[in-house]
Image: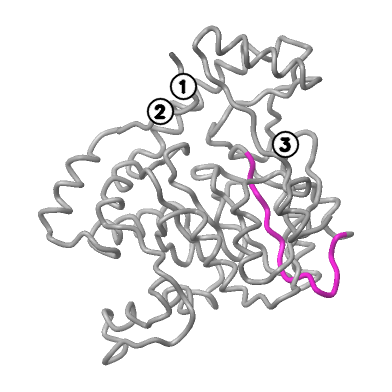
């Protein structure tokens, strides 16, 4: 049987978990969390990385950092996971759903500007399947209208746009290390901070609204409640597992790309299906291989055929603008 996803270990996961236990500190921001931060900051070239317990948590932190008020609007693609929208709805903001490009299935950068109003505060770009959005155009629009850019790079760890790592391009980036992603820790995520103005407050929000992080660095003589926040830290045991994965990121993504290319060599000869398009300026991480069919019946027949052969593909998102919550909380 070939399942849609199978969690895996690459090298030192169990060794590092045992070491974390021996160190006697399994709560957040321990030795392995700090190691993950250093490694990611080095690879990405960003101002700051903060591990979280999920990409959803990273998105929720991003929404708080943008200081959104009730009724503020945030532009995003409709074709995305619910966490992209939920994070901003929780702050009272309104998701404004924009259609996607037919080639990459990313937000159509040419439709963003017409969706901007006086209430717009940010653009959220989702790098679908680890393939970058057209970031130059999006950044240019954001600069012209004084908007923040948040990268939902849940699927984009190890992908690049014009040589720049995804997650390092907007004001904030969000990663996922869920077991269905390339680099995994079961559950897990990270907030990537590229705009220095957000660093101090991000540390506070992540620590339940306290200045605990500054206290442990010796910057304040006691820590106390100073802002809103929540418990966004992962256990250091989770970080230990993740650290082994991050050490082998290039090896993992290279293996996935080899498999991705095998799928592509097979499917691209069929005229009845549309295969992934990778723009020349994008280097992707082979997060997923997908095909688009001409009809729902064709897709259903394909899935059933594969299941009969013990291969279990899945279809992806229901567009958020057509969902009950999307119609209640957002608009197009």
Q: Mark 2 and 3 residues: CB-CB less than 8 Å, in contact?
A: no
User: Real-space Cα distance between discs 3 and 1?
Assistant: 25 Å
Above or below for 261 versus 123: above
Q: Residue at x 40, y 54 (%)?
A: 40
Q: Residue at x 43, y 79 (%)?
A: 209
User: Real-space Cα distance between discs 2 and 1?
Assistant: 7 Å
Residue 270: image location, x then y, percent = 73, 10
**In the rendered image, which residue does mark 1 sit on?**
3
Q: Mark 2 and 1 residues: CB-CB less than 8 Å, in contact?
A: yes
- In this rendering, position of residue 42 left or right of residue 23: right
Image quadrant of residue 127? top right
Task: Pick whichever, 150 or 225, lies toward us.
Answer: 225
Q: Does the segment drawn in magenta span residue 124?
A: yes
Count of marks placed on residues: 3
The quadrant of the image that shows the N terminus is: top left
Q: Does the segment drawn in magenta span residue 9?
A: no
- In this rendering, position of residue 198 left or right of residue 14: right
- Outermost bottom residue: 221
Q: Residue at x 70, y 52 (%)?
A: 135
Mark sitting earlier along the chain (3/1)? 1
**In the rendered image, which residue does mark 3 sit on?**
104
The quadrant of the image that shows the C terminus is: bottom right
**In the rendered image, which residue does mark 2 sit on?**
6
Above or below for 326 versus 87: above
User: Real-space Cα distance between discs 2 and 3?
Assistant: 26 Å
Residue 93: image location, x then y, percent = 70, 69
Image quadrant of residue 275? top right
The magenta stretch is 115-128
């Amino acid at each position: 049987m070939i399942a849609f996803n199978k969690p895996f270990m690459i090298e030192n996961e169990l060794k590092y978990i045992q070491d974390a236990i021996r160190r006697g500190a399994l709560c957040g921001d321990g030795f392995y969390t700090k190691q993950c931060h250093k490694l990611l900051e080095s690879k990405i070239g960003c101002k700051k990385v903060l591990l979280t317990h999920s990409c959803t948590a990273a998105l929720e932190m991003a929404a708080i950092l943008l200081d959104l008020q009730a009724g503020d609007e945030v532009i995003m693609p409709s074709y995305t996971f619910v966490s992209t929208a939920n994070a901003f709805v929780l702050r009272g903001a309104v998701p404004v759903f924009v259609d996607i490009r037919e080639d990459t299935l990313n937000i159509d950068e040419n439709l963003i500007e017409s969706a901007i109003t006086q209430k717009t505060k940010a653009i959220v770009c989702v790098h679908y399947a680890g393939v970058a959005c057209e970031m130059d155009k999006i950044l240019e629009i954001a600069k012209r209208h004084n908007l923040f850019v948040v990268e939902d790079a849940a699927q984009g760890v190890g992908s690049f746009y014009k040589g720049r790592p995804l997650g390092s391009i907007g004001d904030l980036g969000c990663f996922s290390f869920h077991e269905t992603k390339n680099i995994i820790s079961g559950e897990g995520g990270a907030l990537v901070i590229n705009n220095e103005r957000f660093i101090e407050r991000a540390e506070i929000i992540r620590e339940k609204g306290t200045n605990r992080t500054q206290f442990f660095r010796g910057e304040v003589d006691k820590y106390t409640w100073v802002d809103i926040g929540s418990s966004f830290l992962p256990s250091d045991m989770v970080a230990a597992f993740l650290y082994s994965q991050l050490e082998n990121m290039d090896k993992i993504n290279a293996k996935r790309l080899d498999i991705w290319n095998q799928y592509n060599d097979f499917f691209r000869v069929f005229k009845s299906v549309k295969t992934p398009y990778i723009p020349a300026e994008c280097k992707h991480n082979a997060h997923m291989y997908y095909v688009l069919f001409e009809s729902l019946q064709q897709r259903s027949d394909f899935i059933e055929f594969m299941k009969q052969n013990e291969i279990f593909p899945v279809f992806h998102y229901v567009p958020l603008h057509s969902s009950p919550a999307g119609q209640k909380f957002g608009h197009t």
